[in-house]
Image (spheres, rainbow, N blue to C red):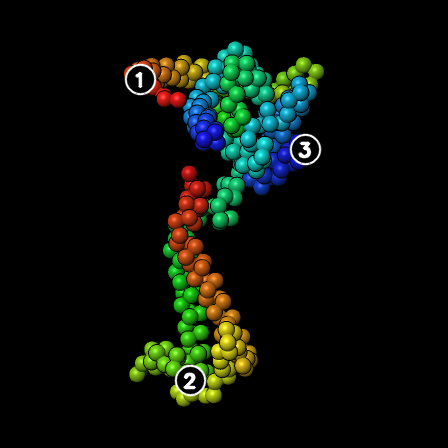
Amino acid sequence: MIEFIEECRREWKRLGVPDAIANEMAADLTADIEEAEAEGGSAEDVLGNSLFDPRRFAAAWAGARGVSTSSIPVPDGPSAVPARDRPRWYGPIAALALTAAVLLVALVAAAAIVGRHGSAVAAPVRRILEVPGSTRLFAPGTPTPPFRYSVSGASFVVQQAGPFTVLVFALLVVLIIALGLAVLFWSPWFRRGSNRGTR
Amino acid sequence: MHCKLLLDTLRCMATVDGRRSQLLRGVLDLCLLAVMGEGAAYGYEMTKRLRARGLSMVGEGSIYPLLGRLERDGLVETRRQASNGGPPRKYYSLSLEGKRALETGIDEWKAARDAIDGALDLAKVEVMP
């Protein structure tokens, strides 16, 4: 019970509820719960299902009374930033930034492969980057590939790996993560979660 | 076979509970105003009054946020007063506006109830065992 009240107090503090009002609400709650327990009942008789979600309960109560000076609601869904607190331009700007990051990583990875790897796999990419009249990111010519792969049985073996290999793989990982975030951002699940806070 | 029957029964109970819960939630403010009409009361006292009338909807959630809204809307007046041997409690009572809201709410409820009764009374349900 004490833990519940303390959790409520923390939430009220977070929401900017004045101390005097928070103390009053905590005292009322404590008295009611103590009375219920004295009569052989429990805190659940007073609080119902709210007993299991003190932060939501505290936020709902403060919100209903109109005593919170902050509009920060209880975190809900995948985003800790409430949707209603976001400016209107948040969505498009975030999407653009994410897309730009993905493109940048992809471009750097492709450029690195073209510049340092002369395999046939890189040829189409090189064609894209070496458009006549455009600025080339890397000097033409094919230096010796810094790493080479061979298939031995079922295993895929890196025969020679250096910092460049690590860089390429790191870029690949970043690319995958960025793509995952982009998909997550645009998915209906994410939108549902964001909209929940606006209802 | 028994399992299916049990599952169907449980599913049916859950549906009934859900509907009842939603129905009660829609009129809980009215019920609170009504029990306050019997005399000023503090939070838990109102819960007990509701329970005494067979309304245990507090199990679905607390009445405190609702009391807060009623207070903010000016439908109730509050005062802090010593209780029987316990700490001072916040007592809620109906304001003039609250009395009007209660009167209007009761009329609305009765109208809605009559309309629903009219629709449901037409239904003829036979459930095969």
Residue A170 at x, y percent in the picture: 51, 70
Disc 3 target residue = A2
For mark 2, give the secondary structure.
Answer: loop
The residue most toward the right is: B85
Pointer 1 residue: B124
Dot 3, how many residues are within 10 Å of its Cα: few (below 14), some (14-19), or many (20+)? few
For this rendering, which residue is in front, A68 or A73? A73
Helix, strand or loop at label 1? It is loop
- Report how far apart the C-alphas of labels 2 and 1 lie in the structure: 81 Å
Same subunit, tags 2 and 1: no
Judged by depth in the image, the label closer to the viewer, 2 or 3, is 2
Residue at (41%, 83%) from the top-left corner?
A119
The CA span between labels 2 and 3 is 68 Å
On whether disc 1 and disc 3 are found on a single subunit, the reply is no
Q: Chain of mark 3?
A: A
- Residue A129 seen anywhere in this rendered image of the structure: no
Q: Amino acid at mark 1?
A: Lys
